[in-house]
Image: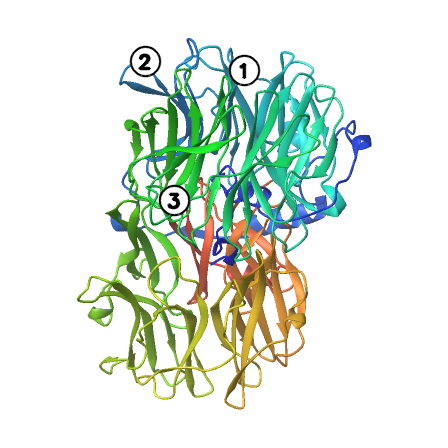
Amino acid sequence: MTPLTVFETIPQPAPTTAATRARLAARGLRLPVLAAGLAGLTLTGCLGADAGEESAQEALAARAQWTQAKLPATAATAAERVSFSGVLGQAGALPKMVAGIAAEPGEVDQARVWTNDGGVTWNWKELPVRLDGDADVFFAATDGVKTWVGGTATVPGGLAVPFVAESPDRKSWSRLALPQKAVDAAFTPGSAVSVDGQLLLVGTTGNNQPALVTPGEGGTLTALPAPPEGRQWSGFAGVAAQGQTVVAVGEAALPGQTKEAVVYRSEDAGATWTAALGPAQGPAGVTGIAVVANQFVVTGGIFDDTSRAVAAAWSSPDGATWTAETMPTFNHDQDQYAPSETAGYWLTAPSVTGDRLVAPMMIGDDLRLGALQRDPNGAWRLLGQTADWVLPGANGIGAVNEDGTVLLAQFDSNAGRLQQLSSSSGSWSDLLVVGEPAPGVKWSTFLDPEGSPDLVGYTTVTTAEGNGGWTRTSQLSRFTFDSTGSLLDAAWDPAESANVTKVSASSPQGATVALGERIVTDAKGEQDLDSVGWFRPAPDAPWQALEGLASPRSEEIEDVAWINGTWVAVGASRETFRLSDRKTAAIWTSADGVRWSAAQGPFAAPEGGWNQLEGVCPLPRGQALAVGHEVSAAQIRPAAWRLSDGLWQRLDAAALGDKGGWLSSCTTVGDTTLLQGGRGDRSIAWRTQDGTTFTANELGKPGDDFGPIRAVDGGFAAAGTRSSDGRDGAVVWLSKDATTWQPVPLPSTRMLDGADVKAHEGRLIVAANSETSPEVWTLDNPAELLNAQ
């Protein structure tokens, strides 16, 4: 798990591949900086590692011997996958339109638009930008005459290739020519605006730098100013123009810090630019920008003192000076659509018709999507909300039709729906429902990294309860391998652990513990999440149910290990099963594997925040070490506890550095313990021999992702994704010393994210996920590749 997702942040327009997620990841900043002198700098360098490094990686990949495992039908997605990226309202002869991607099960994503014929019929059309690899769509824009849709296509392990399609009627489309330098730089278009008949594309290059592209004959790629004071760029959320003034908004951050907003501004139709922090001060997210009544209006959210996202908007007559606008007040107990006291909520990108501006409002734990309207005098009010859907907190986008009705689109988990809201009555109607809200199985981890190669998959299931309420559970499946290397459905052992067991561990003597959670409902209908588990002292012994795990609180267990004669499990607990209740780190221990108790210690969450544990392992001298993270003041920080003389002690936060980040797992080999986690867009491993002093080592390059590091014969391995240098694709990372890593790409034809790896009989089994169907590959010669490094 990547703890960056545990607190409610403000989403960016959602890319679907690892590379673009990394390039648009969150970070943070402050202080305005003018950098107009950089605006004329042309990007000329190509992407990629240096020639020697690239050659070594290619040679290693050529020697890899792979075998793909056959999967059972239960592990495949059976329905079409759909995801939306933009929606445009009806204007004159231009019909209502939704843009996004779609794919058949196991196939690559294709760029697509859906348009309405003026009645009840919707038609879809694949854009004429067919390139090799998976497509991503990032924006849909119009000037009222022409319409543009832009994105990228990526072959696994290759560079992202940008595209922009243009249409005069939203029915017939042609592909615009982009400058070769934009292609070489793996430019990802984030948003577009037309100024004096010239289309301007703002976006991000493969080496994570902001840039401007003008398409067509004689088109250019131009570097934009770097974010203020050395901040790292995250990505653009939108761009708008008023006369010759062009304003684009995006985000950037200091390493390991929460993102903040950045304003890019040009007074000469995009010829020169400045960059400054704003329109908000401090941690914030921006989702879009529009012009209404001679004002630039930016939407998004800020964080309150409990690290909760709160809807926000800002306005400016010139894009230089900004005023925070007053949002409506909401009462969860009285209003039909309102956030609870702890639920995050924010505005997504705005849309304009005449002097009316409308922005969707998302509530992070609601099944519905609302819409706020900004009146000509700058006052905001709630227009209404959609009906319940089947997915809580689904991504939401919107647009205003010429007649004043509002289009609200939700999309998540391979499905999308579009509803229309009346601005006068607040009533809604269904327009379009596509895909199936069934993302299929995704791999979690191998059940016991030290035991048999049993793989756990999960499927998310949501049950609607009315008025925006819901219950979400993960349906777990167990798989194992037969003698031919095919993956098979496996029976749970013991049988009563079906759909419950998440983690398992074994002792050197052959004893095994299996742990998980189960939803229980009391006589009043209130639900709780109880930890449960089973123990057996030997492989052929009967299982025994565990005692002492359940409590009046809701518990979640994330890892378990046998450490120096004691079983130790870690995770979190909260007061109730409600998502709004904050988590507190929790540890459970047992001397005999059957009788368990909650450990006492300094586990309290920071004021106004929360914390949780993700991993546990022994230190070289045998003490238990538990690792995780905490969130406070809208920042995420690593946290760890060590068992010393029978007492749990929190490690000094300064020992892990002062730049923020998180810990997700740990493992000990010989006299060294590796703590794994990350900071910003960097995967990091901290080394220690005494549990007191730590040395941080950045893994791979910015954007590269590493799953749990596993010790294997001759070194270390981790499943993951190479998402640096503008490239993207699932890999298995190999290293002799856990310091210098080489990626070996999986030979899949689809975009995948590496999930976990397990050594088995001299081979490496690699589990990888996608949004359509997962895959499993076996690397048959890992020792040879490790020796070749």
Q: CA distance from mark 2 to mark 1?
A: 20 Å
Inspect the image, locate mark 3, and give the three-letter code of the amino acid beneath it.
Ala
Q: Nearer the viewer, mark 3 or mark 1?
A: 3
Q: Earlier in the sequence, mark 2 or mark 1?
A: 2
Q: Which residue is mark 3?
A: 338
**CB under 8 Å between callouts 3 and 1?**
no
Percent position of residue 163, x then y: 55, 25
Q: Nearer the viewer, residue 135 or 406?
A: 406
The residue beneath circle 2 is 118
Looking at the rendered structure, the secondary structure element under dot 3 is loop
Specify the quadrant of the image occupied by residue 558: bottom left
Image x and y of residue 223, in percent: 73, 31
Amino acid type assigned to the residue bearing label 2 in the image:
Gly
Q: Earlier in the sequence, mark 2 or mark 3?
A: 2
Disc 2 versus disc 3: distance between alpha carbons? 33 Å
Q: CA–CA distance between discs 3 and 1? A: 34 Å
Figure quadrant of residue 514: bottom left
